[in-house]
Image (spheres, helix red, strand yellow):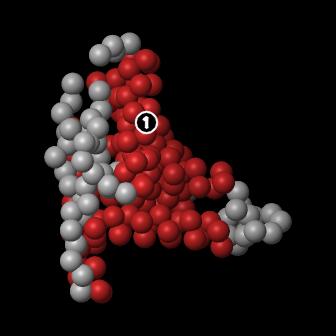
Amino acid sequence: MNTATTATVSLGGVTIGLGILAWHFTKWWRAGGGKGPGPGGGGGRDPKVLLPFMSSMALGMVAVTAAGGLIGTAAVFLLNGGSMAGNWSLVALTGTATPEVTRTGLKALTPGGSALLAIYFVILIAMWKSGAKLLKGKIVSGIVCGCLLGLSAGFSGVGSVALVTITNTVGDKITGVVM
């Protein structure tokens, strides 16, 4: 069984992650409340427009709990880079301290959960390859957002715990791994 990740997230990283989330929700909201698609094909606040971003955000949240491998290492690299950029921006813009806000009791992926993560990663690569430039931007920003928010002690961290639990349960059932 995989051991839990030793990565940590700072207030700066969570701030960047929440900023990315706010950006996408604001663009979606402003895309229109009237009839038909908004400017730029926003879909008139159609929730389906958020699916590429939210599904890739879920991938980032689960990937950052992987103990290692290429996916886990890349997720922690994104997490560390985002935390450093967020720390710098918070100190430079507001002069505030940036404490660590990693939740306690991190949940690790089981072998079945790790297999499902790999399958999910393949699905997102297929979406990436078949998508337009706008879709690719949503996927990348969603993964970064998920990596930055996945270990948070706040509400986003609670969502990540639920996602990891679901990933482990479904992955173990699909692969036949019984722990």
Q: Name the residue at the right extreme.
A: 35
Q: Quadrant of residue 1?
A: top left
Camera sees residue 24: yes
Left or right: residue 127 versus residue 80 is right
Q: Position of residue 31 (x, y in %)?
A: 68, 70
Residue found 74% across the figure and 64% down from its top: 44
Q: How many marks?
A: 1
The residue to which callout 1 is attached is 120
Q: Position of residue 169 (x, y in %)?
A: 41, 25
Left or right: residue 37 versus residue 13 is right
Q: Secondary structure at mark 1?
A: helix
Camera sees residue 143: no
- 10 Å crowding of disc 1: few (<14), some (14-19), many (20+): some
Residue found 66% across the figure and 73% down from its top: 30
Q: Position of residue 149 (x, y in %)?
A: 36, 56
Residue found 32% across the figure and 55% down from its top: 153
Above or below, comparing residue 133 to residue 173 in the picture: below
**Three-letter residue code for mark 1:** Tyr
For this rendering, which residue is in front, 156 or 55? 156
For this rendering, which residue is in front, 73 or 4? 4
Above or below, comparing residue 109 to residue 26 in the picture: above
Q: Quadrant of the C terminus?
A: top left
Residue found 70% across the figure and 62% down from its top: 45
